[in-house]
């Protein structure tokens, strides 16, 4: 039997990058998935390819997240899994030179979104006394890099939020975990490095003992495990999927 057979899931930021890798793995393992993304066309294209459903969502807005939750429950009748994957960064710069607009955007999408999805969907999971939530954090939460200070801080917040959610929701049958990827072949890679050149890639890869970037498939495999019954005794962890980057 597939590991997520009969399960239903929402994956935010699911149209590309790590989110798309998680979506593909979940579908391969038997789940029905709502691909939720601010890029509605991208979400629909992937949903059409995989036979799933798409939802355009701005995870920084409560009304948009509420509409996503309503659409998912109308389609699935119940929700087993929520993956908070949508995220952004600011370009590398001294911490005191990041614009207020960039700071606010990072906070709204990386932090506020987790609150909004919890507000919209945790009551449903509480009523059913089951559920699995995965928050996609980052190695930046554990081993911060210079010039990405407010992005680092947002991912550190996500790890603390994961642990806090886990300890509060465990008695209600809801597990909450995080995954910490290192940078990968996603639209955010250039943002992390400042520029995407062979020299910058080589410099970055030199910090990863296994010698490669995280891939969408790596994230899909980790998220699938944490959301499966195989991980029924695991909650409150921040699993590093980083090739040894933070050792």
Image (cartoon, helix red, strand yellow):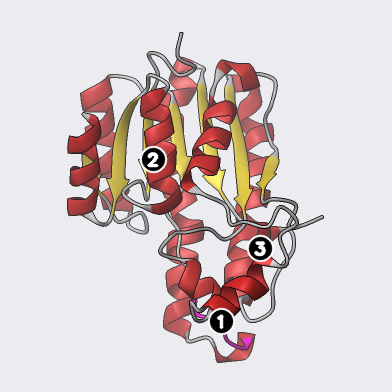
State whether residue 118 appears in this view: no
In the rendered image, residue 115, in percent from the top left (x then y), is placed at: 48, 49
Q: Is residue 243 left or right of residue 59?
A: right
In the rendered image, residue 156, in percent from the top left (x then y), is placed at: 66, 59
Q: Is residue 93 magenta?
A: yes
* Mark positioned earlier in the residue sequence (3 or 1): 1
* Mark positioned earlier in the residue sequence (1 or 2): 2
Characterize the local packing of mark 2: few (<14), some (14-19) or many (20 or more) Cα atoms within 10 angstroms: many
Mark 3 highlights which residue? 140
Vertical comparison of 55 with 191: above or below: above
Vertical comparison of 214 with 172: above or below: below
Q: Main secondary structure of the magenta part?
A: loop
Mark 2 highlights which residue? 11
In the rendered image, residue 205, in percent from the top left (x then y), is placed at: 65, 65
Question: In whole angstroms, how far apart are the C-alphas of marks 1 and 2?
Answer: 27 Å
Q: Name the foreground residue: 192 vs 99.
A: 192
Q: Secondary structure at mark 1?
A: loop
Q: How many marks?
A: 3
Q: Secondary structure at mark 3?
A: helix
Characterize the local packing of mark 1: few (<14), some (14-19) or many (20 or more) Cα atoms within 10 angstroms: many
Residue displayed at 53% across by 42% down: 219
Q: Is residue 78 left or right of residue 29?
A: left
Residue displayed at 67% across by 30% down: 235
Cβ atoms under marks 1 and 2 closer than 8 Å = no
The label shown at residue 92 is 1
* Mark positioned earlier in the residue sequence (3 or 2): 2
Residue displayed at 38% across by 40% down: 11
Question: In whole angstroms, how far apart are the C-alphas of marks 3 and 1?
Answer: 13 Å
In the rendered image, residue 142, in percent from the top left (x then y), is placed at: 73, 58
The residue stretch that appears in magenta: 89-94
């Amino acid at each position: 039997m597939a590991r997520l057979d009969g399960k239903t899931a929402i994956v935010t930021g699911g149209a590309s990058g790590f989110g798309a890798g998680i979506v593909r793995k979940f579908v391969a393992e038997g789940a029905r998935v709502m691909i939720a993304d601010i890029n509605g066309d991208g979400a629909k294209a992937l949903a059409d390819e995989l036979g799933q459903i798409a939802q355009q969502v701005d995870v920084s807005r409560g009304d948009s997240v509420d509409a996503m939750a309503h659409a998912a429950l109308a389609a699935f009748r119940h929700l087993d899994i929520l993956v908070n994957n949508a995220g952004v960064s600011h370009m590398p710069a001294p911490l005191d030179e990041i614009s207020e607009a960039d700071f606010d955007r990072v906070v709204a999408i990386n932090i506020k979104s987790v609150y909004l999805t919890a507000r919209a969907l945790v009551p449903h999971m509480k009523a059913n006394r089951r559920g699995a939530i995965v928050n996609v954090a980052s190695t930046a939460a554990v081993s911060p890099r210079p010039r990405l200070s407010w992005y680092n801080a947002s991912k550190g917040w996500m790890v603390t939020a994961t642990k806090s959610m886990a300890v509060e929701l465990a008695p209600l049958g809801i597990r909450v975990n995080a995954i910490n990827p290192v940078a990968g072949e996603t639209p955010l890679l250039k943002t992390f490095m400042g520029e995407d050149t062979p020299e910058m890639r080589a410099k970055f890869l030199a910090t990863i003992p296994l010698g490669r970037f995280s891939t969408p498939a790596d994230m899909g495999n980790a998220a699938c495990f944490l959301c499966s019954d195989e991980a029924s005794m695991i909650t409150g962890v921040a699993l590093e999927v980083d090739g040894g980057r933070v050792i």
